[in-house]
Image: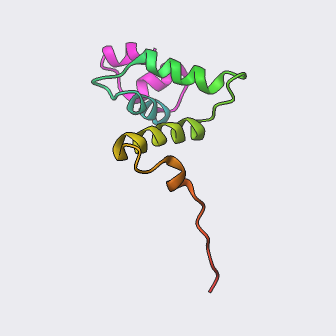
Amino acid sequence: MIALGIKKKMSYREIGDSIGQDHSVVFREIERNGGRGNYWALRAQRWADQLTNPGNRATARGAAHSRAALLVNRTFRGAYNAGTFATPRVVRSR
């Protein structure tokens, strides 16, 4: 439905009304999956399936962490790993 709304040049509000969601939800969904000019419905569906599959137990935060870990590994080419950046900070009271 979202891809069809984009193709018909509908506003976020019109798309949201047609699928029963707020326009802000539609905006975030479109931006997360390529934007108006490059929206990819299949990628959006795969992401949703990954998050809702009970056997997978993936969460949005966990999936985002995995993407961040890949980015760190690609950027630093093994010089650092995701654990380097995930180490908890010790907060000392004054």
Q: Look at 55% across and 35% down and name the residue there.
A: 63
Percent position of residue 51, x then y:
61, 27
Q: Is residue 26 above or below residue 80?
A: above
Q: Quadrant of residue 77?
A: top left
Outermost residue to the right = 54
Q: Does 67 appear above or below 76?
A: above
Quarter location, residue 14: top left
Q: Main secondary structure of the magenta part?
A: helix
Q: Is residue 67 magenta?
A: no
Task: Tell me how many marks there are.
Answer: 0
Q: Is residue 72 left or right of residue 88?
A: left
The front one of 26 and 83 is 83
Does 17 lie within the magenta span? yes
Q: Is residue 88 above or below residue 10?
A: below
Percent x, y of residue 81: 48, 48
Task: Residue at the far left: name it.
Answer: 37
The residue at the point 42 percent across, 32 percent down is: 32
User: Where does the image place residue 45, in percent across and percent down from the top left?
Assistant: 51, 18
Q: Residue at x 30, y 19 (%)?
A: 9
Q: Quadrant of the C terminus?
A: bottom right
Residue situated in front as seen by the camera: 17 or 74: 74
Q: Answer above or below: position of 80 versus 19.
A: below
The magenta-colored residue range is 1-23
Residue at the image point whose x is 49% and y is 24% from the top: 17
Q: Nearer the viewer, residue 54 or 84?
A: 84
x%, y% of residue 86? Answer: 55, 54
Q: Dividing the picture into quarters, in which one does residue 7 lie?
A: top left
